């Protein structure tokens, strides 16, 4: 028989009411590692990831805004370029209207020819100011980058064989770029 008055050593070490071991008040919780060094790398990488994600989203939004802005600026540039050219050509159009008005009742061919020559020179001067220059082709060598051969005819002289004999339609440069190839006739 056991003596109930003597305390047993196992009863004094455990708290039977809670069913768990007692912990110290400043002890780390279960699953936690003591010290901040082990917990910092996980939170540091998460913070870096969040920072990089934020930078990426901002950069993507900035790029979309850039694309939208440059598209709008390009459209505006084309509008203003056409507007500038049209404004430069309006005086020539006015001259055509005046010439038609003043020559409609005349039978003098020289007056009509003179008014057309004046307007042609003004138009050519305006286009030259905007960078348009005509190609010089007659008697020159054929260049497929500049010329379009329409046909070949027997050369009138030996020095025109393989060269441009006639120009059917004039070619033009805008600055350094060919905007219309010259249509030419070659000598055989």
Image (cartoon, helix red, strand yellow):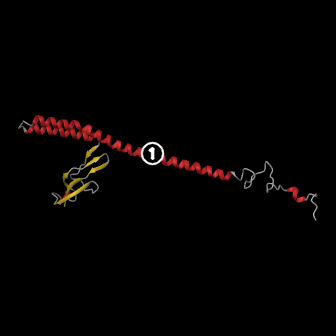
Give coordinates of residue 44: x percent, y percent. 65, 50
Give coordinates of residue 11: x percent, y percent. 87, 57
Give coordinates of residue 93: x percent, y percent. 20, 38
Q: Is residue 70 left or right of residue 103?
A: right
Looking at the rendering, in which quadrant would you find the C terminus? bottom left
What residue lies at 39% left-to-right and 46% top-to-bottom? 71
Give coordinates of residue 97: x percent, y percent. 16, 36
Q: Is residue 15 left or right of residue 116?
A: right
What residue lies at 26% left-to-right and 39% top-to-bottom? 86
Which residue is at the front of the view, 111 or 45?
45
> Badge 1: how crowded within 10 Å, few (<14), some, or many (20+)?
few
Looking at the rendering, in which quadrant would you find the N terminus? bottom right
Which residue corresponds to mark 1?
Answer: 65
Q: Outermost residue, left direction?
A: 107
In the image, residue 105 sits, relative to residue 144, either above or below, namely: above
Q: Outermost residue, bottom direction?
A: 1
Which residue is at the front of the view, 132 or 37?
37
What residue lies at 18% left-to-right and 40% top-to-bottom? 120
How many numbered discs sit on the rendered protein? 1
Which residue is at the front of the view, 100 or 53?
53
Q: Is residue 45 left or right of residue 186?
A: right
């Amino acid at each position: 028989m056991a003596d109930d008055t003597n305390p047993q050593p196992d009863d004094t070490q455990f708290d039977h009411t809670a069913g768990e071991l007692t912990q110290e008040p400043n002890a780390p919780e279960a699953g936690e590692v003591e010290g901040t060094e082990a917990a910092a790398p996980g939170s540091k990488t998460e913070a870096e990831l969040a920072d990089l994600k934020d930078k990426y989203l901002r950069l993507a939004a900035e790029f979309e805004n850039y694309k939208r802005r440059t598209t709008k600026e390009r459209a505006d540039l084309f509008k203003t370029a056409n507007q500038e050219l049209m404004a430069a050509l309006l005086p020539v159009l006015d001259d055509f209207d005046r010439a038609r008005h003043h020559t409609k009742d005349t039978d003098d061919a020289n007056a009509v020819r003179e008014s057309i020559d004046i307007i042609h020179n003004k138009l050519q001067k305006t286009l030259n100011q905007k960078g348009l220059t005509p190609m010089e082709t007659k008697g020159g060598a054929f260049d497929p980058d500049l010329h379009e051969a329409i046909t070949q005819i027997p050369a009138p002289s030996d020095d025109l064989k393989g060269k441009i004999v006639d120009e059917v339609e004039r070619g033009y440069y805008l600055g350094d770029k060919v905007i219309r190839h010259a249509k030419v006739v070659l000598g055989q």
